[in-house]
Image (cartoon, rainbow, N blue to C red):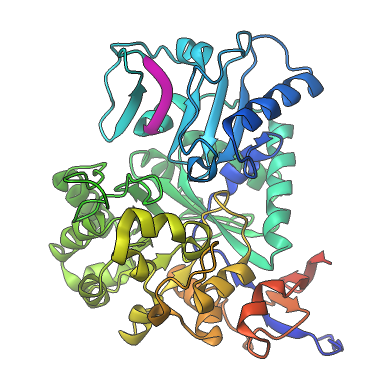
Amino acid sequence: MQRKDLAGKTLLPSFMDSHSHLTALAQTMGLVNLRETTSISEMVTKLEQYRKTRNIPKGEWIVGFGYDHNFLTEKRHPNKIDLKDFTENPILLAHVSGHMGVTNALGLEQMKIEKNTPNPEGGKIGKLSNGEVNGYLEETAFYQYGASILQWGEEKIISCIEEAQQEYAKNGITTIQDGLIKPAEWKMLQTASNRSALYLDVVGYVDYYHPEIVRKHPEYVKKYKNHLKIGGYKLLLDGSPQGKTAWMSAPYEGEKEYKGYPVHTDQEVEEAVHQSVLENNQLLTHCNGDNAAEQLIRAYEKEEKEKVKKTRPVMIHAQTVRKDQLVRMKAINMLPSFFIAHTYYWGDIHQKNLGKRAETISPAKTAEELQLPYTFHQDTPVIDPNMLETIWCSVNRKTKEGNVLGKEECIGVYEALKAVTKNVAYQYFEEDTKGTIEEGKLADFVVLDKNPCKVEKDTIKEIKVVETIKEGKTIYRD
């Protein structure tokens, strides 16, 4: 046992990430960072600077990440015409949501996307007014065509995984998630695990349509091996509300009929749910729109309630889930994991897209009043894994323009802390070893320069992580 004087600083159980994408963050290391761009011309300039300073050879892909069309001067996505000057390099620009992106003419050629290429189910290939493809790819179209671009060697994988872990560690996080594992992601994670390059606990969720990963690697299923374990499956049912692809029960503002759209049929969702319950495996399901939430809840309500409860299914994002749906979720022990920082980052956009409905996005207070456990996440690399900013968002619910988005859904600081510690441990079936400071649990701690419960609520995001400790070992110090 060691004794240490914290000199007035605050010790907490370390933060736990309830949903993000470790390998996706690793893949953004070294890409063109487009997060702060404010116009398409600025994006083009950054791409050209990257090409020149890195001396990118002819034919090599240039990949950018993090643009948001909502905050560009043009208020639209770029297209192949905007990228027409890149004639020697294929380009792929990934939207900050990870649900859509853009490629140039050479990229379309290499992806073999032509004028008559059909939209894949649950996705969209953008078109110009003359019917030609414009380079925009949405949902499954973006996933399918963009998946094979990044091909890395083992040393590059290790380097970027280690760098990505440090992003979590400096934010006080010691347990992280990789929330959509396909064969390429599994290769990265297993490589890091085999090389003992993981020093944070990583809980992976396998794409439901790649069950072979679970079958072939039982040594990782529900137990850690070299800091890596498979927690269950992942399924996506819709898109994002800021991209107007979340599947809503009522039309978006300004639309007569358009409500977004589903990724899967009811039968497909019911089959996935039934199989996960049959295997006693946890299923994490991406649902942003209340219609997607309804599709998931109905599928679980058809299963035997007690068996469902044992699997602790998780609704990821749950942005527009309704109170009546939360009541039904509690009955089957389904946890909502809220991306509550939406209130700040896209709250003003949601007010335009959803009207009055925007005031109840990420309804944490309603869940709390129903005594339904909930967690918070950042969906990194969509935004940085900044837990203190997330706590600030949950207790203040301020938008970028300074509006309060649904004051009645604000929660207390202590409840917010539980949503990134104790409740996440429960979500991962790790409540016996993590989430609180108790004898017999892992020595996973974070040291803060101030106590979040004792400062002004509006200053919480200014609190600094001083030290992060994993199993008694300091892995980050400011």
Q: Position of residue 176 (x, y in %)?
A: 58, 59
Q: Is 5 part of what is drawn in magenta?
A: no
- Which residue is at the front of the view, 223 or 13? 13
Residue 56, quarter of picture: top right
Above-or-below relation of 56 to 167: above
Above-or-below relation of 267 to 294: above
Judged left or right of residue 386, residue 268 is left
Q: Position of residue 406 (x, y in %)?
A: 39, 74
Residue ID at (49%, 72%): 397
Q: Is residue 153 visible?
A: no
Number of callouts:
0
Q: Is 135 part of what is drawn in magenta?
A: yes
Q: Quadrant of the image for the C terminus? A: bottom right
Mostly what secondary structure, the magenta segment?
Answer: strand
Judged left or right of residue 18, residue 121 is left
Residue 27, quarter of picture: top right
Judged left or right of residue 417, residue 310 is left
Q: Quadrant of the image for the N terminus? A: bottom right
Residue ID at (38%, 82%): 408
Q: Position of residue 137 (x, y in %)?
A: 40, 28
The magenta segment: 133-138
- Which residue is at the front of the view, 14 or 183? 14
Above-or-below relation of 130 to 122: above
Above-or-below relation of 287 to 211: below
Q: Is residue 94 visible?
A: yes
- Which residue is at the front of the view, 190 or 238? 238
Q: Position of residue 89 (x, y in %)?
A: 62, 13
Residue ID at (45%, 35%): 76
Residue 294, quarter of picture: bottom left
